[in-house]
Amino acid sequence: MQIHTLTAAFGRLDHETLSLQSGLNVIERPNEGGKSTWAALLRVMLYGLNTKDRALTADKRRYLPWSGAAMEGRLEADTVLGEVTITRRTARANSPMGAFSAVYTGTAQPVEDLTAANCGETLLGVSQDVFVRSAFIGQSAIEVKQNADLERRIAALITTGEEDTSYTTAADCLRRQLNRRRYNKTGLLPQLEAQQESRRRELDEIQALEDTLRLDLDREQQLTLRLAELKAQLALHDAADRAQRAQTAHAAHQALLQAQSSADALAQEVRPLPPRAELEAMRGAIAALSAEKSVIDQLSQAAQDAENTLHRSEAELAEVPMTWPAALPEGAPLCASPRPRQPIALLVLAMLAGIGAGAALFMATHSLPLGLGAGAALALLLLTVILLTTKKRQKTWDQQNSALRQQRSQELAVYAQAQQQVHTAQERFHQVAAQRDAAQAQARAAAQRILTQVQLFRADAATIPAALAAVEEGIRRWATLDTARQAVQTAQVRWDAVSADGAGSPAEPVQRPLLSRIQLQEEIQRISALLADLQRQIHTAQGRIQALGDPDELRQALKDGQSRQEELQGEYDALALAQQVLAEANTALQNRFSPALGHQAEKIFAKLTEMKYNRVFLNREIVPSAQEAGQISPRDAWTLSRGTVDQLYLAVRLAICDLVLPEREAAPIILDDALVNFDDRRMAAALDYLVELGQRRQILLFTCQHRESAYLAQAHPGRAHQISP
């Protein structure tokens, strides 16, 4: 198959066209340039779009056109059927790429028997699973994954040439059949075994229930008889109670008659007396008199105390010392002598002495100025002495008079205080005496009123104590009458309560059982509870026996189940043997085709690694390991570098393509960034092999680097078709 053009509205591709040629085509695009989209488009054009996938990453969501247009694509190719143009477009929103058409290129004539379902397998000769796991090689999906279709294809081409069967399919079928019969605790055998065990348990349970039921029925009969006996004894208690109530009713009637008679007699005794409330009021008034007497006594004592206080205050006033009379006029001098005055006579004598001394000196000296000066000086000196002496005496007198006035003020303060105490004591005495006199008068009037009231029913009550005794006696009689009337009411109530049993002659007493009523009731309650529980157990056992079914039917079902169990066990053993034989045959088959596939892969791997590795080994899951030239043992893939692992898986993929892809259809090989982890030397070796392989198949190599194109232009000019954006 040779692809000429691809055109699509698919993902980021907006009606773009990719033109290809035979051999190796290198499509160089940057990251997110649509390389994987073109590869996915080719797969969808050949095998269709899975619209049933509901994952968020499903192709129907992942490759919705960014432009908003309907998803569609067209493929023009040279196929085994001739030049064909295949179109897939979206006719309905819920079926993207669902409309399929295949016509011969340049015409409108449909290609017969080429449908949307068989397009890829018809044109490439393999199913989608085989194509994706062989020729559809991507950077993130370069590993080989086992698949029943791929397994059938490899086994068919290496062994019988038939593609109708595979070990995986047959093993899955056998495993399902084995699991259907037994898988851990599920399957037909475990279910049947559980049913058999359940039937055995049901038979054992029925037998145990029947044994227990017989014992419970015997126990029920015994408890029923015991319950009837206890109820008969309780009935004797009822009869004894009725006889006792009759006796009680007779006694209550007699007590009522006696109480009524006593109450009537007491009512006659209290007829002359005032009502009880009036007597209570009289007793309260007498009690109030006692309280008033206490108050009067307190007031009398208070009056006596106030009078004594007055006498003491008057005596204290009389004893207050007074140096001067209390009625002394304000401002009168208190000193015994009068206040000193200026001595006029002495002043005159001093002046005369000065004049005489001046005259004498004048006569002696016959000097007038000297005589006048000496006389004046002497007179002035004498006057000064007299004035100073008088002033000093006045000051002394004033100090003495002031001290005496202060003393008088203190005496007057003490006197006034004593006088105020006398006045206060007089007022207190007069007030308390007036209260005492008023209380005595009020008490005498109240006592007279009480005696007047009491003498109406007790003429000999002449004193308050006698009146109190009469009142207390009257109240006692009324209380006795009230008690008798209350007794009548109580007897009436009791009689009303028991009168239903009659007031005639009491019934004959009934002999009571040994057990008391409470003991009998407790025992009846206990026996009834036991009997109820036992009856529930009996009903439960009977219902359970009915639910379990007929024992004979269970035994027959157990026998039939045993036969079916033996039959299933025989099938299971036969299937297990078949599974073992199939596994041995598959091992032999794997041992046949694994070397062939490994031999083809090691030739390619040796070229890709420049002969560093010369052996490739594959296990039954097509997981490879590689051996370096000159080494003894191979190395697992996970121990190799990332680049070497990619080269190993690429070699296996290309070997599978050589083995499983039909030469007639010549299915193209798609590589999406498959060489990205190769270094430059091994990339060159890989490109050399791809150029050689391109002579037999069309190859689409998508890459995000320019080094592949650069190397091909230099090493293989004209042998590769380079497509750049």
Image: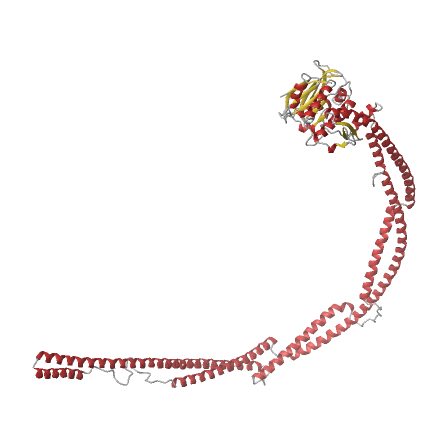
Quarter of the image where the C terminus is located: top right
* Residue nearer the viewer, 455 or 680: 680
* Residue nearer the viewer, 452 or 564: 564
How many numbered tags mark residues here?
0
Residue 88 figure quarter: top right
Q: Residue furthest left?
A: 366
Residue 723 figure quarter: top right
Residue 414 figure quarter: bottom left
Q: Residue at x 38, y 86 (%)?
A: 318
Residue 285 in the image: above or below residue 549 = below
Q: Is residue 297 visible?
A: yes
Whole-percent x, y for residue 328 in the image = 30, 83
Residue 165 in the image: above or below residue 664 = below
Whole-percent x, y for residue 492 in the image = 72, 71
Q: Is residue 457 visible?
A: no
Q: Residue at x 82, y 71 (%)?
A: 507
In this picture the colour scheme is secondary structure
Q: Is residue 236 left or right of residue 426?
A: right
Whole-percent x, y for residue 176 in the image = 83, 34
Q: Residue furthest top?
A: 107
Residue 327 in the image: above or below residue 677 = below
Q: Is residue 459 left or right of residue 104?
A: left
* Residue nearer the viewer, 622 or 63: 622
Q: Residue furthest front?
A: 630
Quarter of the image where the N terminus is located: top right
Q: Residue at x 56, y 83 (%)?
A: 464
Residue 452 in the image: above or below residue 31 = below
